[in-house]
Image (cartoon, rainbow, N blue to C red):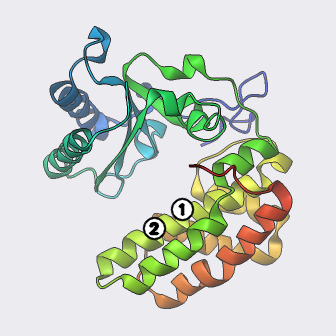
Amino acid sequence: MTLTGHRGLDEDGTIAREGSPDRVAAEFAPVVAATRSLLLAAFGDPDTGSSRLHSAYLYGSVPRGTAVPGRSDLDLLLALRDRPRADDRAAADALGRTLDADFPQIDGVGVLLFDTAALLSELERHDLGFFLACLCTPLLGEDLAGQLPRYRPTSLLARETNGDLARLLPVWRDRRAAATTDAELLRLSRHAGRHLTRTGFTLVMPRWGGWTSDLAESADLFGRYYPARAAQMRTAALTGRTPTTDATTLRLLLDDLGPWLAAEYTRVHGEKTPRP
C-alpha cells in the first residue's frame, strides 16, 4: 500500500521501499524464520563470504503486511555471487516444496535466482535493480540496494519495468492453448491478471506521480485516466487476486485488454530495451 498522503514516496520524492520485516503479520513470522534457516542450511551463511549466496530478499504481500493466510504465496529473490547453476535451482525448488508443505498459511513458494552482476548491471538498472531496491525486503546478507540509485515514477521506469507486454501476450496465448488442466489455467489467469494490472498502473504512474503495488488501487488509478477501460482493468485486478478458468475472462484479458494495453503502452512510453 502507498504511504498515507505520500503516494508511496519518501520526502524527497523518490519511491519508498514498500516492505519491511516489521510489517510481516504474526501468522507469517514462523514462515519467514523457517525460510531464513532453510536458506542458511542450503546455501550457507552469506556473511562469511564463502557462500554462493550473496543475499536473500522477501517480496510481495508477506513483507508488505497484506498477505492472507491460506491464500497468499511466499516470494523470494536470491542474489548469487555468480550465475545460477542447475544445483542452485534444485536447492531453491526443494526449499520451496518444504516450506509449502510445512506451512498451511502459504499457498505456494516462488523463488527468483539472479547473480549480483545482473542485478547491478546498467541494463537492469530500471528493472531488476528497481525491483530489488524498492520492492524487495532484505532477509539475509548485505543489501544490494545500497549500490543502486533512488527511483522516481518516470516514463523511463515505466518503460523498463513493463514495456514488454507485446512480447508476453503470444506466450500467454500459447499457454492457454496448451493447457490441459484447470490448475494450468488458474496459474495463467492469476499471472496475466496481475501483470496486466501492474502494466495498466505503470502506464499512468508518471502522470499520477507515485507508486503502489496494491492491485485494486492500481486498477482504480488506471481508471481515472482511461475510464472506457476501467471495468476491464478491475476484472484483471480481481483475476490477479482470485484466478479463474472462465474462457470469457481469459479472452477479455489476452485478446482484448492485453493487445490494446500493449499498443497504448508503446505509444506512451516506448518498448523495453531488448535483453540478450
Judging depth in this view, the residue of 55 and 81 nearest the camera is: 81
Residue 109 location (% of width, % of height): 30, 50
Q: Which residue is mark 1?
A: 194
Q: How many marks on residues?
A: 2
Q: Residue at x 62, y 57 (%)?
A: 198
Q: Residue at x 14, y 51 (%)?
A: 101
Is residue 177 at all visible to an observer of this figure?
yes
Residue 190 is labelled as 2
Name the amino acid type tagged 1: Arg
Name the amino acid type tagged 2: Arg
Q: Quadrant of residue 234?
A: bottom right
From what the image shows, is residue 20 above or below residue 99?
above
213 lies left or right of 88: right
From what the image shows, is residue 166 above or below residue 135?
below
Mark 2, Cα crowd under 10 Å, few <14 / some 14-19 / many 20+, is: many
Judging depth in this view, the residue of 4 and 211 nearest the camera is: 211
Q: Are marks 2 and 1 in contact (CB under 8 Å)?
A: yes
Residue 190 location (% of width, % of height): 45, 67
Q: Quadrant of residue 151?
A: top right
157 lies left or right of 179: right
Could you give the CA–CA distance between mark 2 and mark 1, rounded to whole angstroms?
Answer: 6 Å
- The secondary structure type at the circle numbered 2 is helix
